[in-house]
Amino acid sequence: MKQLLFIFFSAVIVNVSAQGLTKYGQTTSISSQYVNQNGAVNVSGLTKNGLKFGIINTGNNNALNFDGTNDNVLINSNSSLNITTNITLEAWIYATKNSGVQNVICKSSNSSNNGYIFPRTDDGWNSFVFYLHVNGGWKTLSYPYPALNEWHHLAATYDGTNMKLYLDGSPVKTLAATGTITVNANSLCVGNQPGFSEYFGGTADELRVWNTARSQTDIQSDMYNELAGNETGLVAYYNCNEGTPAGNNTSVTSLADKTSNTNNGTLNNFSLTGSTSNWIDGASPLIYDGTSSLKASSSAYAIKQAYPSSADGYYWIKNSNINGGNPFQIYADMTTDGGGWTLIMCNTNPNSGWTNANAVLRNETSPNPNGDYSIIAWADYIKRSSVGFQYMFDANTRRSYGGIFTANQPYSFTSRVNTNTDITINTKFGAWNFFEGGGFGPRMPWWTTQTNDGIITTSQSGTSYWWGTLVTGSGWSPSPWLSGDGGTLSMQGPGIIWYWVR
């Protein structure tokens, strides 16, 4: 599962032709298995960023297999594990046992049945659950588990307001919850809940406990990488690199915490020989580069962060809140201002077929940067954060008659009000000025109730002030855009308008 760590020193010269990455993200010295910058198997080895550099492998790629019968790891109670407010729990798991209750990371027991547990299944991995004991009672949040015998990254967060679940880096479920997490004297247990027979069956790797609520960006940025152990908020970290994969490891009975908290664990009941109940090979990285429905990511921004060499074009993304949770294609600008832009609307001349209803969802599964298209209704689930996300529009030709903006409030792309004015202009495409009634209005585009003129617009209204409009139902070319903005710039009929989010 783990990516290699890459360290670069000007004084160190590494022969890059001698080692490269395979299509599974593993190092190899067999040149016929190397992956080049185009994703093809070739003689040009790459780092995780698609660049040719010297590679220094600073760790093994091991994991810990649990037999599902009685294997478990006990970590003595430590104050660093008594988390009361914000928390994040993460693990890569390869589940194989298809029955019963199973626990992976557990700070609860039969005698003190409280604390936190994640990931857990109550039904043999038909679903995975986040258990959190707040305000004197358990709060639970569950989501369907994709399939047994596959590697998946699972994460859960609590920020004092909401519990959240992440599957393979994508947010999938949220539950409102408040209160202090119950503190207890329980040992942290990996693989069971002490006092019960709820043993995990499968393989675990990269187990992490944080006393912060990590963001989606944080989770996605680090899920494929080994950590140093000194990251802010990291209170326990088990990279499971001990032992020799499937070898005789009868003397390797400790699970080391890579933080300074020394939350080390003791292995109990493991056979420590062979391919089960032992240290074994870790996972090959799951690749979510958006190049197929099986590799769907959460947005163009997430793809660009994980795969910086991604080019403009079509990609697959998915989110449980949109399109029935099924993967769908989007068009992405991976170039402008660092890239990571998802196209959420394109309006072309001749203007035809736009209504107030389809202005926010039109041809939604057929993205077209040169045709009429809208997924504005889905944009709130694609933006990178609730506050500080960016949007962009341009017209006539790319990077003209528009700009890049940051929303400084938790504004919605389907807002029905014209008061979303706390925005910052990051970049202007052209020498325009905000100008009510003749150009862009000083607000984030909003969804009016108009049926003709300004349906999606930056103006105060869609009637008397209609300039700066992205979608209209009347016969403009394709929509009233700039009419002089006070005399400095004009582009009344741009012919095409694009709208983007990241």
Image (tube, rainbow, N blue to C red):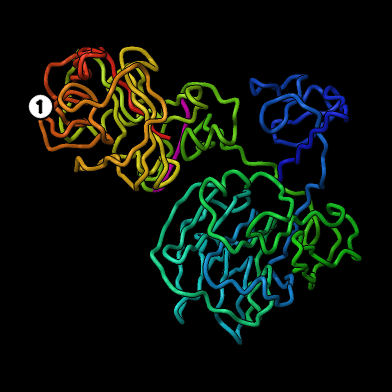
Quarter-of-image position of residue 446: top left
Quarter of the picture containing the C terminus is top left
Instruction: Decide if residue 91 is on the left or right side of residue 169.
Output: right
Instruction: Let me know if residue 123 appears in the view.
Output: no
Residue 168 locus on image (x, y percent): 55, 47
Furthest-bottom residue in view?
111
Secondary structure of the residue carrying tag 1 is loop
* 232 or 120: nearer the viewer: 232
- Say above or below: 271 vs 36: below
- Amino acid type at circle 1 is Asn
- Residue shown at 80%/57% (left/top)? 279
**Within 10 Å of the Cα at label 1, are there few (<14), some (14-19), or many (20+) other Cα atoms?**
some
Residue 176 locus on image (x, y percent): 38, 64
Quarter-of-image position of residue 36: top right
- Say above or below: 430 vs 289: above
Instruction: Decide if residue 461 is on the left or right side of residue 347.
Output: left
Residue 408 locus on image (x, y percent): 37, 43
Provide the residue designation for mark 1.
452
* 462 or 47: nearer the viewer: 462
- Residue shown at 44%/79% (left/top)? 135
Q: Which residues are drawn in magenta?
A: 314-320
Marker count (numbered):
1
Instruction: Decide if residue 203 is on the left or right side of residue 345.
Output: right
Residue 302 locus on image (x, y percent): 52, 37
Asked if the stretch drawn in magenta spans residue 124, the answer is no
Instruction: Let me know if residue 102 appears in the view.
Output: yes
Instruction: Decide if residue 82 is on the left or right side of residue 427.
Output: right
- Residue shown at 10%/31% (left/top)? 451
